[in-house]
Image: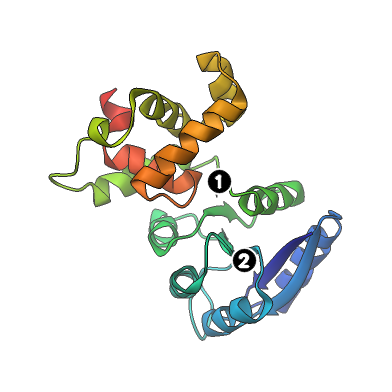
Amino acid sequence: MIRVLLVDDQAVVRAGYRVILEDAGDIEVVGEASNGPSAVVAAAQFAPDVVCMDVRMPGGDGITATREIVAAREGDRPAVLVVTTFNPDEYVFGALEAGASGFILKDCEPEDLVDAVRKLADGKGLVDHAVTHRVITEFAQRRRRTGASDAAEVLTARELEIVLLLARGMSNAEIAQELFVETSTVKSHLGRAMTKIGARDRVQTVVWAYENGIVEDR
C-alpha cells in the first residue's frame, strides 16, 4: 500500500484528492496538512511514501516545506509531488531546487494524479509533460556550473548514452529497445550513473544532463 500525505490549504481540495487516490485501491491517505510547517510535522509523524504538496499556502509555502522534508528524510522517502494551479516557471524551478521528485498541475485528469503518485512511490521522478523540456532546459541553464567536471570523465560511454536517452523522454523499456539490451541492463546502468552524479531520481538525472550539456552537445 502506498502511503500518501496530502498538503493543501483548502479542505475541499484535500477531500477530492483523498477520494481519487483511495479509490485506486493501492493508495492510502495517512494524513493531511493545511500549510508548510504542519506538513513538515505530519511528514515526520506519518512517514508517507509520497507527499502531495501545494505551492502557495497561507502560513507557510510548499517550497520551503519541501526543502525541509527532503533535508530531514532518510533515503528516498518521502518523495514530494508538487501539485499546483500555478504554471509559471519560477514555481517549478523552486520545487526542483527544493528537492521535489516531480510536479503536476491541478487541472490534470484524476488518473494522471494516481499515476504520478505511483511513479514517485516507485522511485521514478515525474514532471508534467506539458512543460517538461522547456522547464528543465531553462532551469539547467540558470544553474549551469562554470568549470563543471566533464561528464565524460564521470560516466562511462554506455551510462552517458542511457542518460541522454532518458533526458529525451524515453522510458527504461524504450531505451532498452533503442539499444537492443534488456530493461534490467538499462536499470543497472542508470542506477550506477545516478549514484555517480548524486541524483535522487530520474528528474534530477535529467536536470544534471542539461546542466552538463549532454543533451545539447551530443
Location of residue 199 in the rendering, given as x and y in whole percent from the top left corner: 41, 49
Q: Position of residue 157 (x, y in %)?
A: 34, 23
Q: Which mark is residue 151?
A: none
Residue drawn at x 56%, y 21% as measured from the top left: 176
- Give residue 20's quadrant in the image: bottom right
Q: CA distance from mark 1 to mark 2?
A: 16 Å
Residue 167 shown left or right of residue 78 in the figure: left
Q: Earlier in the sequence, mark 1 or mark 2?
A: 2
Residue bearing mark 2: 51
Residue type marked 1: Asp
For this rendering, which residue is in front, 88 or 133?
133
Q: Is residue 86 left or right of residue 4?
A: left
Q: Residue at x 41, y 64 (%)?
A: 98
- Between residues 37 and 12, which one lies in front from this camera angle? 37
In the depicted structure, whether residue 116 falls above or below residue 170: below
- What residue sits right under mark 1 in the picture? 128
Secondary structure beneath label 1:
loop
> Where does the image place residue 126, in percent across and percent down from the top left?
56, 47
The quadrant the N terminus occupies is bottom right
Task: Please report contact status of discs 1 and 2: CB closer than 8 Å, yes or no.
Answer: no
Circle 1 residues within 10 Å: few <14, some 14–19, many ≥20: some
Q: Answer whether residue 16 is visible to the viewer in this image.
A: no
Q: Is residue 3 left or right of residue 217?
A: right
Q: Quadrant of the C terminus?
A: top left
Residue placed furthest toward the left? 147
